[in-house]
Amino acid sequence: MPSSVIIGSGSCVPDRVIEGSHFLNSEFYTDEGDLIDKPADEIIKKFVEITEIETRRYLNDDEFNSDLGYKAAKEAIYDASVEPEEIDYIIYASNFGEVSKNGMPNFMPNMAARVKNKLGIKNRKCITYDMIFGCPGWVEAMILGDDLIKLGKAKTVLVIGGETLSRVTDPYDRNKMIFADGAGAVILQRTDEENIGIIATNTVCDNAEELMYLECSSTLNPNAEDQDKIYIRMRGRKIYEYALKNVPAAVKETMDEAGIDIDDIDKILMHQANAKMDHAMVSRLFKLYGKSEYDHNVSPMTIQQFGNSSVATIPTMYDLIAKGEMKGHEFKKGGYIVMGSVGAGMNINCIVYKTPQ
């Protein structure tokens, strides 16, 4: 059976750096719609203690999601040295599509088609799919791309994750300080070499009571003018408890399928949700293998500088490490990389990837 390997990567980290001081004039409300009677600087300080997010990146006013995705895709295509016309599928992971400047989601035309257009691809057999799967969307798009290659439906697949969450956050919600913008992309290509590239995958969907842990809803401020506008809404405590209970087990299942142990892992690229949760998930994974401590270098983080850009966090981190742009981190040849994510649905997924020698 053929395998799929990453032959190129790209990312787009927006230039606008948003510090905590950006939120000093904010009024914050509880989930029950009550004004939080605390100084904004006190709320911001507590937020940083929990999430470790010091800065985040926002796109410029004249930019859109597809612009970020296009830049990441163009870079990945160049890095892979492939002709755009040779791409069989473009899969674009996003949860809000081409969000307008006033925060209106837009999925028509779909994101992958927009990027195909920007790339100037004329090939009518280059198929464009969008993946709406919460923060795990890019990992799920990778799983789909791998399936298409293994089924003989594709040789070359462009997989993009792009999001502009800064435009869909409630100005009265403390969680707005978590979210950010960005895009990442890779080129997956077929190889007949065995035991390389994506060697194991796993997806779990819990859609019962977990369905509303992450959703869209109106503003928390009951006195705000536009009560019909929708924003991203997150039940932080519920998500934290769910992730700690379920993500480590799902990752271990994937590693078991790949036939590898925790000591075999080169890097764990976990979705950058918030630092506290990511540390806890990785720590609990190691405990499943009887290890009470772990070298934090195995699980790099970008959340502190870039914030949570949803589907873009893992491909961006992969690209930065692959190109030597994350100090102290590199991928070993023949090493195993675990990519794992959790998000709206609730959905969990994981990939075990073996880098070429």
Image: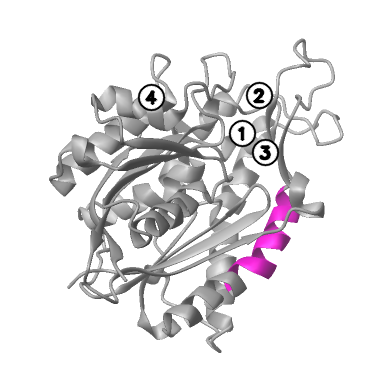
Identify the element where label 2 is drawn: loop
Indicate which disc residue 114 carries: 4
Identified at 78% across, 16% down, the residue is 227
Q: Quadrant of residue 162?
A: top left
Identify the element where label 3 is drawn: helix
Q: Main secondary structure of the magenta part?
A: helix
Q: Are marks 1 and 4 in contact (CB under 8 Å)?
A: no
Report the Cα–Cα distance between label 3 and label 1: 12 Å
Report the Cα–Cα distance between label 1 and label 4: 27 Å
Report the Cα–Cα distance between label 2 and label 3: 14 Å
Q: Is residue 234 left or right of residue 105?
A: right
Label 2 or label 3, whichever comes before in sequence order: 3
Q: Are marks 3 and 1 in contact (CB under 8 Å)?
A: no
Label 1 or label 4, whichever comes before in sequence order: 4
Label 3 amino acid?
A: Ile
Identified at 54% across, 60% down, the residue is 349
Label 1 amino acid?
A: Lys
Q: Is residue 1 visible?
A: yes
Q: Are marks 1 and 2 in contact (CB under 8 Å)?
A: yes
Identify the element where label 1 is drawn: helix
Q: Quadrant of residue 37?
A: top right
Tell me the residue that label 1 is attached to. Answer: 176
Q: Position of residue 315 (x, y in %)?
A: 37, 49
Q: Are marks 2 and 3 in contact (CB under 8 Å)?
A: no
Indicate which disc residue 171 carries: 2
Q: Quadrant of the C terminus?
A: bottom left
Tell me the residue that label 3 is attached to. Answer: 43
Q: Which of the two marks, 3 or 1, is nearer to us in this view? A: 1
